[in-house]
Image (cartoon, rainbow, N blue to C red):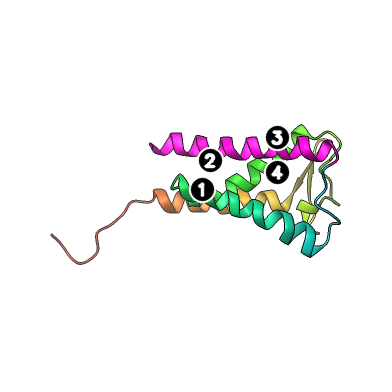
Amino acid sequence: MKEPAAKICVLASAVCYGIAEAFAFSHGFSPGPPTLLVFVAGYHLPMAGLAFLVTFGFRQIRMFPAWALMEDVTFFVFNRAATLQKSSWIAMGLGGITIGEAFLPWTYVVLLSIWLVLEFWYARPQTKKGGSQ
């Protein structure tokens, strides 16, 4: 599969997961109390495993941060009951910035930065090692 198509598939899978997650949560699904063991290990680690399989399967492992970012943003867009705010789990106590009416967690900035660094690193010119040929 060509590079742009693979990236679109990876991001489309994140959007689909985010929509499904928003639907489930807005219709009463709850993985349990927001504790480290239940909320993180019992829900987010399997989701991260799925994201890894998708990004690895499309040979786009560097898009893992973009997958996580796209999934989370999609969740908040499609689940009107959940609002993105400083006390949201995704903010991880790091806070964020408010732009107009929207709150942007620093976690999103970090994920976006990591993804961009990986993309630029991957796109850099490759040089042959081992002398002239």
Look at the numbered discs 1 and 2 and tell me whether their residues touch, using CB distance below 8 Å. Answer: yes
Picture quarter with the C terminus: bottom left
Q: Is residue 26 above or below residue 129?
A: above
Which residue is label 4 attached to?
72
**Callout 4 crowding tier (Cα within 10 Å): few <14, some 14–19, many ≥20:** many
Magenta-drawn stretch contains 9: yes
Look at the numbered discs 2 and 3 and tell me whether their residues touch, using CB distance below 8 Å. Answer: no
Which residue is label 2 attached to?
10
Which residue is label 1 attached to?
55
Chief SS of the magenta region: helix
Is 57 situated left or right of 91 in this image? left
Where disc 1 sits, the SS reads: helix
First reached walking from the N terminus: tag 4 or tag 3: 3
First reached walking from the N terminus: tag 2 or tag 3: 2
- Of residues 11 and 45, the one drawn nearer to the viewer in this rendering: 45
Q: CA distance from mark 4 to mark 3?
A: 10 Å
**Callout 3 crowding tier (Cα within 10 Å): few <14, some 14–19, many ≥20:** many
What residue appears at the point 49 percent right and 53 percent down from the top-left corner?
Answer: 118
Q: Where does the image place residue 74, in percent across and percent down from the top left?
A: 70, 37
Q: Is residue 28 above or below residue 56?
A: above
Residue 71 numbered mark, or none: none
Q: Where does the image place residue 33, in percent across and percent down from the top left?
A: 86, 56
Give the residues drawn in magenta, as a range: 1-28
Q: Residue furthest bottom?
A: 130
Q: Is residue 75 above or below residue 127?
A: above
What residue appears at the point 72 percent right and 52 percent down from the top-left corner?
Answer: 106
Identified by mark 4, the residue type is Asp
Residue 19 numbered mark, or none: 3
Identified by mark 3, the residue type is Ile
Q: Residue furthest left?
A: 133
Q: CA distance from mark 1 to mark 4?
A: 16 Å
